Amino acid sequence: MTLFLFWVFAVLMVLFGLGVVFFRNPVNCGMCLVMSFIFLAGLFVTLDAFFIAVVQVLVYAGAVMVLFLFIIMLLNLNSEGRRPLNLAAVGGGVLVVLGFLGLLAKVLGSSTFFAQPKPALGHPELSDVKAIGLTLFSTYNLPFQVVGVLLLVATLGVVLLSRKELK
Amino acid sequence: MMPTLAHYLAVSGLLFSIGIAGVLLRRNIIVIFMCLELMLNASNLSLVAFSRFGLLNDGLPNYNGQVFVFFIVTVAAAEVAVGLAIIVALFRARQTTHVEDLDGMKY
């Protein structure tokens, strides 16, 4: 059952990911990105990472994508006109992608470590929100505070950048 | 029948390659930005997969990986906000989002 769900989510996620690259209209790209993120959240659920799946839907499919679509609407972007493809960029892109995938296939085939099936959880009834919260506020307390400051700085930076005239 | 670690890593690598291809092939700066998000999410998937497959001694997932994903999501959200503000400022100055028209720093 998990394998079936894995394939459903994985295939749909990759298809919508391809949609981001191949659609010409930025709004279509954004919609494909939302669907890709939602199916990625499904993959997180098959990995028993429920908290991360919810965060994925809330933050990415919710907040980040609203921001993207808002900016597309604000800039009033239409489909880009056809321009001649930069052959060097296309060739380089294909080369980099094929090299990366070949390397990945070689690494994944090199060890039986990657062929292990998903191990059963010791305590399936334990809530992962609680466990992540304990880890976050004990081991990673300082990074957590630093991320808070980072968000504040980012907010101030955005306000500064969006003022009418930049000095 | 359970999916193996290789399944998840392969899907994650595929999504990452789609992101790279998008960054290199597309010329609209907002779509390039979306493809960057795709690559960040691909790395998140492999982190969560490692967290679930590398069980600790008491049979729990290694939650360090999931906390790491949490931080990546937070930083990515901040990055999107700042990046889109820069794109809007750029659009105000140049009236375009096409990267080939934005070559002021080239050469």
Image (cartoon, coloured by chain):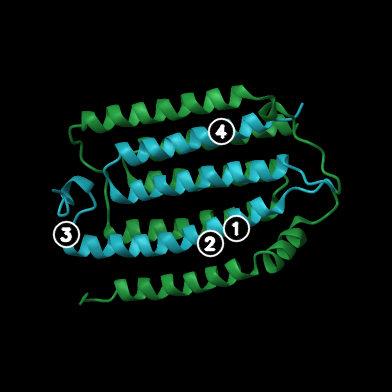
Chain colours: A green, B cyan
**Mark 4: secondary structure:** helix
Gap between marks 2 and 1 measured at Cα: 6 Å
What subunit carries mark 1?
Answer: B
Quarter-wise, where is residue B71 in the image?
bottom right
**Which amino acid type corresponds to the residue marked 2 in the rendered image?**
Thr
The residue that appears at 70% across and 30% down in the rendered structure is: B3
Give the labeled residue for mark 4.
Answer: B11
Disc 4/disc 2 C-alpha distance (Å): 23 Å
Front position among marks 4 and 3: 4
| Residue B70: numbered disc | 1
Q: Is mark 2 on a helix, strand or loop?
A: helix
The C terminus of chain A, quarter of image: bottom left
| Residue drawn at the location 49% of the way across and 37% of the way down | B15
Q: Are marks 2 and 1 in contact (CB under 8 Å)?
A: yes
**Secondary structure state at the residue bearing disc 1:** helix
Q: Give the distance between the C-alpha atoms of the residues marked 4 and 3, in whole angstroms.
A: 38 Å
Residue at mark 2: B74
Q: Name the residue under label 3.
A: B94
- Chain to which the residue tagged by mark 4 belongs: B
Residue density around tag 3, few if under 14, some if 14–19, many if 20 or more, within 10 Å: few
Residue A112 position, x and y percent, is 69, 24
The tag earlier along the polypeptide, 4 or 1, is 4
Q: Which residue is drawn at 76% across and 59% down?
A: A131
Mark 4 and mark 3 in contact? Answer it, CB < 8 Å.
no
Q: Mark 3 belongs to which amino acid?
A: Arg
- Most foreground residue, A39 or A110: A110
**How far across and how far down the image is residue B31, in percent?**
35, 47
Are dots 1 and 3 on a single chain? Answer: yes
B98 left or right of A39 in image? left
